[in-house]
Amino acid sequence: MKQIDPSEFKVNSKIDLSKKNTIYDLQSSEDYIEDQLKEVRKKLGKWQDTLYAFGKYSVLICLQGMDTAGKDSLIREVFKDFNSRGVVVHSFKTPTSNELKHDYLWRHYIALPQRGKFGVFNRTHYENVLVTRVHPEYIMYENLPGVNSVEDIDETFWEKRFEQIRNFEEHIVQNGTIVFKFFLHLSKSEQKNRLLRRLDKPSKNWKFSPGDLKERALWSDYQECYQEAINNTSTGKAPWYVIPADDKATARYIVAKILLEELKSYKEVKEPELAPEIHKNIDLYREQLQKEEN
């Protein structure tokens, strides 16, 4: 099986998404890939237990991608072996009326994971420079000072948003949140196949919405906005990873492997040692318990 090098997928310089592969050959069977994923996710689950005991870091995983890119199933499969209390998933939908009364980052900030836990954002704060950029009329719901019409939403507006997002991520990193951002890079032809499966399989019909086709018609616009968002916000402390996503099993394994390899670099994350006064009395505590009557 091909070895995964996180740097192969990390965005360290300007990228052209049209030149990024949506297929990746792990040189192995699907069954073997799934077996290897099981091994990796067990190690990730154990690392989270250690993270909780260490108590100084949290991990935020941001997932973005076009409809049908496989975000939901990736979350289900990659985090299956975590302690259920150790990972919290947030799926951000259309902002509520209460959320719109705050700045656009507010609902994401209050959903950040506690120290010792993993947080997964299924769609993220980047929707505010993706969906709203393709549909700038949505910005009007935010009731922002100085924005009285769509014509007021110019390139300077988006440049400021990129800066705000970079500052937000820098702030949370400085305060102990380890940030990973994954773009599940799906081809337009594979999205078509997956949408057709939603229509062909009765058990998947509920996932389909006519709105999916309206957004698909804007594919090129979304690709351009994703590319600009990634190029403007991939930093050393909060990097983007572009993950080939036409094969779901491969994408899941790559994401899990990147997480494990990068997290292993945090050598200081260890289970704390017992205080000396407790350690020297372990035999005494054991004796006290053994003498208890049932």
Image (cartoon, rainbow, N blue to C red):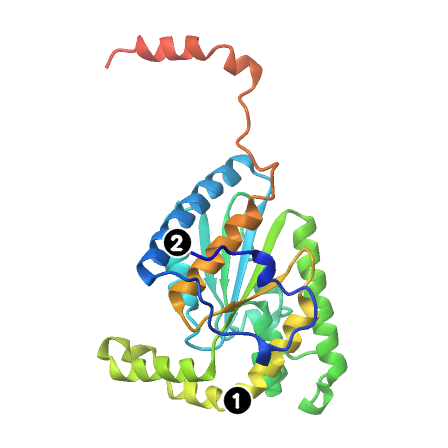
Tag 1: amino acid? Leu
- Residue 130 sits in quarter: bottom right
Residue at the (48%, 86%) spot, across then down: 215
Helix, strand or loop at disc 2? helix
Task: Check disc 2 and report the residue beneath it.
Answer: 37
Q: Position of residue 288 (x, y in %)?
A: 37, 9
Task: Check disc 1 and report the residue beneath it.
Answer: 218
Q: Quadrant of the C terminus?
A: top left
Residue 64 appears in view: yes
Residue at the (30%, 11%) spot, across then down: 292
Dot 1: within a 10 Å radius of its alpha carbon, few (fewer than 14), some, or many (20 or more) residues?
few
Left of 205 or right of it: where is 219? right
Q: Mark 2 or 1, which is nearer the eye? A: 2
Residues 255 and 161: in front is 255
Tag 2: amino acid? Leu
- Residue 11 sits in quarter: bottom right
**Total count of labels:** 2
Q: Position of residue 190 (x, y in %)?
A: 41, 80
Q: Position of residue 137 (x, y in %)?
A: 60, 87
Q: Quadrant of the N terminus?
A: bottom left
Helix, strand or loop at disc 1? loop
